[in-house]
Amino acid sequence: MNFTRAGEALGVTAGAASLQIRALEEYLSRALFRRNGRVVALTTEGAALLPRVQHALRELELALDDTRGDRSGGPLRVSMLGSFLQSWLLPRLPRLHARSPSLNLQVHTSDATIDLVRENQHAAIRFGTGNWPGLTGEKLIEEWLVPVCAPALLKKHGPLRRREDIARYPLVHSTSEPWTAWLLSSEVVDDDTTSPFTGARIDDSAAVVQLAVQGSGLALARWSLAADDIAAGRLVCVSTQPLRNFRSYWLVHSKHGQHHPGLKTFRDWLVAEIAAFARPPGL
């Protein structure tokens, strides 16, 4: 709904983009947009045409993508959250290389849900409920939330046995894993605006874990991101009541990526690693 941004996306001027639209409208003998100064809106005819054009362009892109020879070979490109890469995958990558030295894995990190075809990715490890239209998904890891802190803090303030025990601790807040989820709900909520507690508030789940390691406070952390630090003794669980997260980690791919020979190798290695991955205490 903005000719300037449309022109930038196409690599042309806003005027050139506008002329293209006017030429299309003249060809169709229909107005596709209503223009009111800088405000642009679709007409009824434009709104009806849009999804069919989008579908046709998507099918064309997939057809061209399937024809490209480099899809069946070369590096395996996998997109994932940066937090998952840093805290879970990186420590395990040497075992992948030892098991499959010929696999050339290229990792792309993004906090946003990307279009795998458009971003030239064969697969992705995504964090969610498994509902991604057009993609085939396999659940990898069920996620849990656990309250964790440095051992010295646990020694000073003691374990969590009641809701009121949290008041003894300085807290570290994650915007995606708020303390309100632990106190008020059996499932994680995404809105931390009602939290009655003060403390550092971070929008990076891996950084929250690192703050807890440094002794900055008690954090409600994803088990997948904190488990290795707990096993190494850098963190401790202060409760044996893990909270089930409604989101999980999934391995997903579209039709264009399923034929890459490295995808099965990577998937089989992931499944083996996850089978050996410890579960939270208290389950």
Image: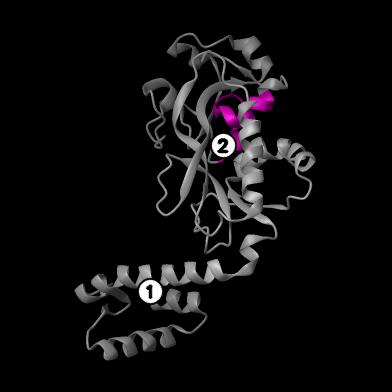
- Please name the residue shown 65% across and 36% down the image: 87
Neighbourhood count class around disc 1 (C-alpha, 10 Å): few under 14, some 14–19, many 20 upward: few
Identify whether 249 is placed above or below 46.
Answer: above
Q: For residue 199, say whether it is visible.
A: no
Q: Position of residue 15 (x, y in %)?
A: 42, 87
Q: Quadrant of residue 96?
A: top right
Quickly name the residue at label 2.
205
> 214 or 233: nearer the eye?
233
Q: Position of residue 173 (x, y in %)?
A: 52, 31
Neighbourhood count class around disc 2 (C-alpha, 10 Å): few under 14, some 14–19, many 20 upward: many
Q: Quadrant of residue 152?
A: top right
Disc 1 secondary structure class: loop
- What label sits on residue 2 in the rendered view? 1
Q: Give the extent of the magenta segment.
A: 204-229
Disc nearer the start of the sequence (2/1):
1
Q: Position of residue 151 (x, y in %)?
A: 68, 16
> 271 or 191: nearer the eye?
271
